[in-house]
Image (cartoon, rainbow, N blue to C red):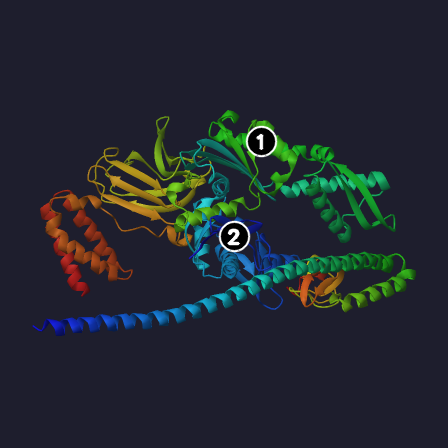
Amino acid sequence: MAVIGIDLGTSTSEIAVYKDGKVIVIPNDKGNRITPSYVGISTDGEMIFGEDAKSQYLGRPQDTVREFKRLMGTDESVKLGGREYRPEEVSALLLGYLKGCAEEYLKETIEEAVITVPANFDDNQRQATMLAAKIAGLKCERIINEPTAAAMAFGIKNMDKDMRVLVYDFGGGTLDVTVLKMFEGILDVETSYGDTKLGGKDFDEKMMNIITRKVYEKNGVNLDRNNLIVLSKLKEAAERAKIDLSFVNETTVTLENIVLNGKLVNTQINITRREFEDEVMDLVEKSGVVIDKALKDKGLTYEDIDFVLMVGGTTRIPVVRNYVKNKLNKNIRTEINPDEAVCMGAAIQAAIKAGVISEENSLVITDVCPFNLGTSCVTEVNGMEVAGILSTIIERNSTVPITRSQIYTTAIDYQTEMNIDIYQTLDNNCIWAKDATLIGQFMLDNIPARPKGEEAIKIEYSYDINGNIKAVAEVLSTGHRRQIEIKRAINMQDVVQNEVAAVLDNYKECNLYKKYKMTIEGAEKRLNTLGESEIKKELMRLLNELKQYIIQDDEDMANEIEGEIIDLLFDID
Amino acid sequence: MDILSELYKISQLSFDEEEASIFQLNASLRESAEISKMIKKNIQKTDTIYYKLDEISNLNEQLKEHTNQINEMVKGYIRIFDFIWEMHRFSKEQSPEILDYIQSILEKIEVEMKKVGIFIDNPKNQKYQTKLHEIIATQEVIGFGNEIILDVLKVGINFKGEIIRKAQVITNLNKEEI
C-alpha cells in the first residue's frame, strides 16, 4: 500500500508518491499538479476544493475558506456554510480531498501520509496538523519540516557528501531560509528564519507598476486599476512578462482592447530584464536580510555554507538566483521543480517509512526543537526572590531527539508539593514565564517536608523526532517521580489534562517489590476498569504511596498502605 | 525355476515396453505437429497484432495531431469571440451607435462556434453557479438578490459537453441576505 507525501501549504497544496524508483507528483481531479488550499460549499450544497472553491471565494465568503493553515493550533474557529469548524477540521477536509485524488490516480486505497509543516511551526500547530490527518483518515506518524523535505528532494542523490546546505524557499507569499547540515547521510536542521510578508506577489506588483508607468509614458494616460477588466489584463500581462524575462532579455507586452482616453486601443510596450531587475532589487535585498538573520541565529557565516537549494516559484527569477549566488559566493542548485520540491521530499520520506527506500541507502533526518522549552521558577535577584521567571531547559534549535535536565530546590520551608509548568517560546530572550505559552502542567507530590532549599528536584525534558514532549520531575532524595507526556496525535485541548499516573520506575528494582507485586498488579488492573471518580483517585494515591514506601524500604508503612488498598478494593467490589 | 519361461516373460515385457514407447512416440509426434501448427498460427497472429499495433500507434499520432489542431481551433474561436466581446462591452458604454453591428458579429461567430461544438455561456442576470462561473469581483446593488450575476467579464465556454472555461463574472453581494 502506497504512502504519499503531502505539502499542505498556506496558499497551495501538492501531493506526490514514490513509485517504480522515482517520485511522481500526483495531479488533482482537474488534472493540475498544484491545488489551491481552498475549501468551500458549492451552490449545489456540495463540498468543493481547490480551483472550484477558489473561483467562488470572492462572492461566497460565507461558504469558502482559505489560509486556515495560519490558524492551526489556535483556538480560533473557521466559519463555513453557517457552521463553525476548528482549523484542523477544515485542513482535514482538504487532506481528505487530496487523499481521494491520490487514490483515484493510483487506483488503490491510501491510509498513510507524510505531511510537511513550516520549520517555525510550534508544537500546537504540529499537533493540529497530525490531528487533521487523523480526522481525514490518514495515519500520519511523521511530519517533517518543509525545508527538510525540499532538501531530501535534492539530497537523496548526494548522500555521500558531507556539507552544509542553505535552503532558500521563496514562494508566492512567504520567504523561508533554513540551514541544514548533511553529515554522513544524516540531515540535520541547524537554523531557520523567515519573512511571512515577502513573496512572488510583490514581484508581480512591481511588474504591474512598470507596465503602468510605460503605458503612461507612451500614451499619456494612467491605466485605471479600478476597472476590473483593465486590472485583470494588467495582472495577466505582468505575470506573463515576469515569466518571459526569466528566459529572454527583453519582452513585448501587448494590452488589447484597453480603454484609454475614452477609446478602445491596443497598446504595446517593451520591458527589459534590466528594468525589471532594477525595480525589484529592494525586494531581493530584503531576502538577503533574512539570510543574514538565519545565519546569525546560529553563529554561521557565508563560508560555512557549501551550496544553496532554490525552492519556491520566485526562485525562477534570474536576479533572485544571481543575488543569492553572488551574496554567498556559492553554487546554487535549481534542478528540482521549485514548486514541487517539498512534496517530492515528503514522498521520499514516505517511501523510506514504507520501506520502499531502505534507510541505509537514504538520508536520515534530524530536526531541531523549534522553540525554547522551560519551566517557571523562583530566582534570587539582588537578594530578592522573584517568582515566575522562565528557566529554559531545552534551547531553541537544539537537534532532536534531545533530553536535558536541570536541578531545582524547594522554594519554601517544608514544601511537600511542587507545581511543574511546561512553557514554550520562540523568544530566546524571554524572561517571564507568563510571556511564554503554557503547554502542560502537573503536580509533583510526596516531597519530604524539610527546610527550603534542602530538597533537590530534577526536572528533565525530552523532545523526540516527532515533536512529542515528555517532562519528568523527580525528588532526588527519594526517587519519587511524576511525569507528563504531551503527544501530537491528540486534541490540544486534552493535552494539559493528559497527566499520566505517577510512574515510579525505580520501585521495581527495590527489595520489597516482590512482596507487594501481586497487590500492585491487581490494583493497577482494577484501576484500568474504573471510570473517573474519587475512588479511582484514592486508589491511585494509595498505589503511589505504596511504591514510595517500597523505594524507601519502609516495610511497616508499606504493609499499612497495602492493607488500605485491599480494603478499598473490597469496597469497590 | 523355469529359466526359459522367465526369459520369455522378460522378452515379452521388453517388447510391450517398446510397443508402448512407439505408441507414445507417435502420440508425442502428433502432439508436436499440433503444437507446431499452433505456433505457426500464433506467429501469424503475433505478426498481425504487431501490424495492428503499428497501425494503432500511427492512428494515435494522427489523433494527437488532430486533437492539437482542434484545440488550436477552439482557442482561436475563443480569442476572436473574447476580442469582439470586449468591443461589445465598450460600445455599450461608449459607442451605442455601433452596438447592434457588433452584436450581430458576435451572434454570427456564436453560430459558427456552435457548429463545431463550442457553446457560449453568458449568464448575466442569472443566479451564480459554482460549477459554471468564476467570481472576479462583487458589487452591492440594492434590488438584486444575493449572488445574482451583474456583469460578465468573460463568457463561459463549453466544448463538446465539457466546461473548458468558467464564465468570469461580477456578482451581487447582498450582505443582508448572507
Label 1 neighbourhood size at 10 Å, few (<14), some (14-19), many (20+)? few
Q: Vertical placement of A178 versus A68: above or below?
A: above
Instruction: Name the image quarter holding residue A554.
Output: top left
Task: Write the residue at 74% across / 34% down.
Answer: A275
| Distance from the alpha carbon under mark 1 to that under mark 2 | 32 Å
Question: Where is residue A313 shown, x and y percent of the image?
Answer: 61, 43
User: Would residue B77 be visible to someone looking at this image?
Assistant: yes
Give the secondary structure at mark 1. Answer: helix
User: Would residue A283 be visible to someone looking at this image?
Assistant: no
Question: Where is residue A210 shown, x and y percent of the image?
Answer: 75, 39
Task: Write the residue at 26% across / 33% down.
Answer: A453
Label 2 neighbourhood size at 10 Å, few (<14), some (14-19), many (20+)? many
Question: Where is residue B5 shown, x and y percent of the image?
Answer: 13, 74
Q: Which mark is residue A15?
A: 2
Q: Which mark is residue A289?
A: 1
Task: Write the residue at 13% across / 55% down.
Answer: A518
Q: Vertical placement of B127 versus A247: above or below?
A: below
Closer to the eye: label 1 or 2: 2
Q: Nearer the viewer, residue A462 or A24?
A: A24
Q: Nearer the viewer, residue A527 or A451?
A: A527
Q: Are marks 1 and 2 on the same chain?
A: yes
